């Protein structure tokens, strides 16, 4: 299942729409406040049901504007924090990948193919992107699996998922002691060596 991600333009557009709604609500609040002031200047009293409801609506609108402004600010800060976290995670993933690729002595072509495998592309799609034959990609993928001591695409991807899920990026280095998974028999679960 592919998850939708927000582009910066979409995020800006949503923030602009929310800001527009806040401005519209603020204008409505100003209208009601002006109307209440005009009614009070004309000899009206807050005890009048109509004038009391208008004053209450004006206060509710002002409270809503303040609340929405605070929430919009919190939302924008949270989105920025999440974006920063994603950039860090992407950088960490690139660092993890490069560390493994160096350990396995992958050629540049194998590194490119390994990256595309990790992105979820199949051999046909990789062949189209690289302008090569699917058989060439299949041979290079087999070489990657051999060098990484894995037995296929799923096991290869699981190495990286395991490293990311460990969440230990504090040292800035790739865990050199990764243990490739080994399938004992068809239908058996994968076991660490």
Image: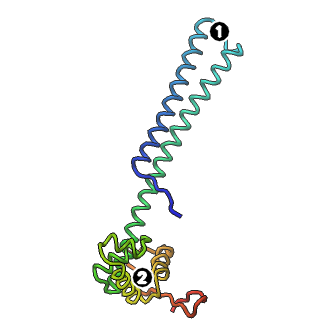
Residue that sits furthest to the top in the current view? 43
10 or 57: which is nearer to us? Answer: 10
Name the residue carrying label 1.
Answer: 44
Mark 1: which secondary structure? loop
Q: Residue at x 56, y 87 (%)?
A: 190
Q: Residue at x 45, y 87 (%)?
A: 150
Is 72 placed above or below 3 here?
above
Pinpoint residue 171: horizontal percent, then vertical percent. Answer: 40, 76
Q: Residues within 10 Å of mark 2 (few under 14, many from 20)?
A: some
Labelled disc at residue 175: 2
Question: Which circle's residue, 2 or 1, is located before the other in the chain?
Answer: 1
39 or 86: which is nearer to us? Answer: 86
Mark 2: which secondary structure? loop
Res 36 quadrant in image: top right
Res 138 quadrant in image: bottom left
Pinpoint residue 146: horizontal percent, then vertical percent. Answer: 40, 90
Q: CB of mark 2 within 8 Å of CB of mark 1?
A: no
Q: Residue at x 54, y 34 (%)?
A: 66
139 or 68: which is nearer to us? Answer: 139
Q: Residue at x 34, y 81 (%)?
A: 101
Is 52 placed above or below 155 here?
above
Q: Is residue 136 left or right of residue 185?
A: left
Instruction: Say which of marks 2 and 1 sits in front.
Output: 2
Q: Residues within 10 Å of mark 1 (few under 14, many from 20)?
A: some
Is 35 placed above or below 70 here?
above
The total number of labels drawn is 2
Q: How are the colours assigned in the image?
A: rainbow
Pinpoint residue 137: horizontal percent, then vertical percent. Answer: 35, 80
Q: CA distance from mark 2 to mark 1?
A: 76 Å
Q: Is residue 179 left or right of residue 136?
A: right
Q: Is residue 181 left or right of residue 112?
A: right
């Amino acid at each position: 299942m592919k998850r939708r991600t927000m582009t910066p333009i979409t995020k800006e557009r949503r923030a602009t729409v929310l800001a527009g709604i806040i401005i519209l609500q603020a204008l409505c609040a100003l209208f009601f406040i002006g109307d209440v002031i005009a009614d009070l200047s004309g000899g009206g009293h807050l005890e009048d049901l109509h004038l009391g409801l208008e004053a209450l609506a004006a206060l509710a609108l002002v409270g809503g504007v303040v609340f929405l402004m605070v929430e919009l600010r919190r939302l924008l800060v949270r989105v920025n924090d999440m974006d920063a976290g994603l950039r860090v995670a992407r950088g960490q993933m690139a660092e993890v990948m490069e560390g493994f690729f160096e350990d396995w002595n992958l050629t540049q072509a194998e590194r490119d193919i390994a990256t595309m495998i990790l992105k979820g592309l199949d051999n046909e799609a990789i062949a189209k992107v690289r302008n090569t034959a699917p058989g060439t990609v299949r041979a290079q993928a087999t070489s990657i699996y051999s060098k990484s001591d894995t037995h296929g695409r799923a096991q290869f991807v699981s190495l990286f998922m395991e490293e990311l899920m460990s969440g230990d990026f504090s040292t800035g280095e790739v865990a050199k002691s990764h243990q490739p998974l080994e399938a004992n028999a068809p239908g058996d679960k994968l076991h660490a060596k």
